[in-house]
Amino acid sequence: MLKEFQRINRRKVYQGAIIDFCKDDIITPKGKQVEWDYLEHKGAAAVLPVLDDGKIILVRQWRNAIDRFALEIPAGGKDGIDEPTKECAARELEEETGYRSDNIEFLQSIVPAIAYSGEVIDVYVAKNLKKTEQSLDPDEEIELEIYPIEELVEMVLKNEINDSKTAAAIMTYYYKYCHK
Amino acid sequence: MLKEFQRINRRKVYQGAIIDFCKDDIITPKGKQVEWDYLEHKGAAAVLPVLDDGKIILVRQWRNAIDRFALEIPAGGKDGIDEPTKECAARELEEETGYRSDNIEFLQSIVPAIAYSGEVIDVYVAKNLKKTEQSLDPDEEIELEIYPIEELVEMVLKNEINDSKTAAAIMTYYYKYCHK
């Protein structure tokens, strides 16, 4: 029978721009006290945008954390802790791709870095896309790329898509909506 | 044409147990200087263990970052920056599940939190499993659970598996090895 660990204290030791670093004091089921890293994050949403012909819109952008460009589904942090992730997904969809959707459906919740980050990304599928205007942040540089879902599945299998939310979303969407 | 961002400085502002917090000074393609969060992590490996009857071994453990138990593929950080991830995967497989494998094959590389963490998790598939001995860290409490792959795919679709590496690995493995 698995026992819970008990957290007796959490203290913020460094405040970042999008994440805060905390040290947690934990009592293990064996009664030992340990200190673990914890990152506080306000949560995020991502969206797999499906055009009327079934093709998927992805964004390519430079990612400092891995020092290269990456292909991802549109995503972003919640505006505040209370922003519903579905609204966040709709907002990021329009900001990053210049499309609006009145048909946004929940796909899955992803915990990207379960060992140390409290971030949860709620992933949605957006259909019935209508062209509006892209509105990027001043520090964002994004290019749109459009692919058939089958090609994206192959890109995951060939290890060409490594972003965790994007790989999970492509494979889950394919299985749920396109699998015969 | 997408332009690269230029990182002109990285300084460690907080050293954690498994991650270090850095502040990066970045010059955007528009020439503006910005300061971004960056987490340094030595890298990790994960492994999807396949029994001879095709069933998959997962581990259930309490996760402080989300305050609940989670079902995951076995995984862990590299012993040091130079440990090959395939050796790390073999080690974590035996430590967490008590099985050894002489047939470990690369599946995919996952970047869990691309917006702020340099962590890369190399995911492997392990077959031809031989029972040895589990050897958990003193602070680990883990239970093994064994499922047919089809049931795990359903659990991802039902939003019951949220860990990013586990969701991606299950769906990618299913498509690559079990998809007709």
Image (tube, coloured by chain):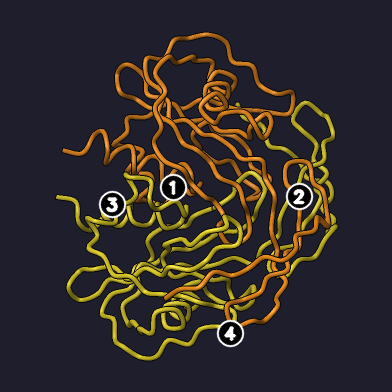
Chain colours: A orange, B yellow
Q: Secondary structure at mark 1?
A: loop
Image location of residue A48, percent across then percent down: 43, 30
Q: Which amino acid lies under the numbered mark 3 shown in the image of this protein?
A: Val
Q: Which amino acid lies under the numbered mark 1 shown in the image of this protein?
A: Glu
Q: Secondary structure at mark 4?
A: loop
The reply to whether dot 1 and dot 2 touch (C-beta < 8 Å) is no
The part of the image, by quadrant, that contains residue B170 is bottom left
Q: Gap in Å between the C-alphas at discs 4 and 2?
A: 28 Å
Residue drawn at x 33%, y 45% is B158
Q: Is residue A172 above or below residue A11?
A: above
Q: Gap in Å between the C-alphas at discs 1 and 4?
A: 38 Å
**Mark 4: few/some/many CA within 10 Å (<14, 14-19, 20+):** few
Task: Name the residue beneath numbered marker 4.
Answer: B138
Task: Name the residue beneath numbered marker 2.
Answer: A20
The part of the image, by quadrant, that contains residue B107 is bottom left
Q: Are marks 4 and 2 on the same chain?
A: no
Task: Give the letter of the chain under mark 4.
Answer: B
Q: Gap in Å between the C-alphas at discs 3 and 2?
A: 34 Å
Side of A75 relative to A13 (left or right): left
Q: Gap in Å between the C-alphas at discs 1 and 3?
A: 22 Å
Side of A177 relative to B72 (left or right): left
User: Which residue reaches farthest bottom?
Assistant: B132
